[in-house]
Amino acid sequence: MTVEISTDLPCAAALVMAPDDVEMPEGFSIRHICRDNRYVVVIGGNNVLTLKNTVDDILRCLKVVDALWRELADR
């Protein structure tokens, strides 16, 4: 099973998001992609509950990163 989250954030957002992806469970993957100068994260795994929890975590982190990015852009 795979979930792809496309954002309006620039590709540099991967630098903020990637450090948490150190110890992945077996059969689980997170890929950080730059597509059309925008940050995309692709999460894959076989366990639906783990996948859901990871997507929830990433969305919470993206909400904070997006708010900070917008604040910095307004300065």
Image (spheres, grey):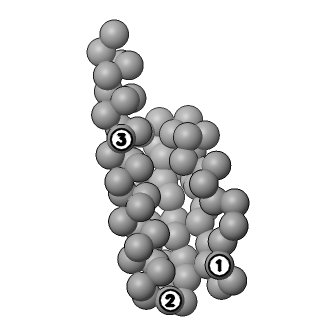
- Other residues around mark 2 within 10 Å, as few (<14) / some (14–19) / many (≥20): few
Relative depth, front residue between 25 and 15: 25
Residue 24 image point, x, y percent: 66, 71
Mark 1 = which residue? 25
Quote the CA–CA distance across marks 2 and 3: 26 Å
Quote the CA–CA distance across marks 1 and 2: 10 Å
Residue 52 image point, x, y percent: 39, 77
Mark 3 = which residue? 64
Relative depth, front residue between 32 and 16: 16
Mark 2 = which residue? 47
Query: Reading the chain from its start, which is encountered first: label 2 or label 3?
Result: 2
Which numbered circle lies on residue 45?
none
Q: Amino acid at mark 2?
A: Asn
Asked whether the residues under the numbered discs 1 and 2 touch, taking CB atoms below 8 Å apart as contact, a structural biologist would say yes
Q: Is residue 58 left or right of residue 15?
A: left
- Other residues around mark 3 within 10 Å, as few (<14) / some (14–19) / many (≥20): few
Question: Residue 75 lies in what quarter of the image?
Answer: top left
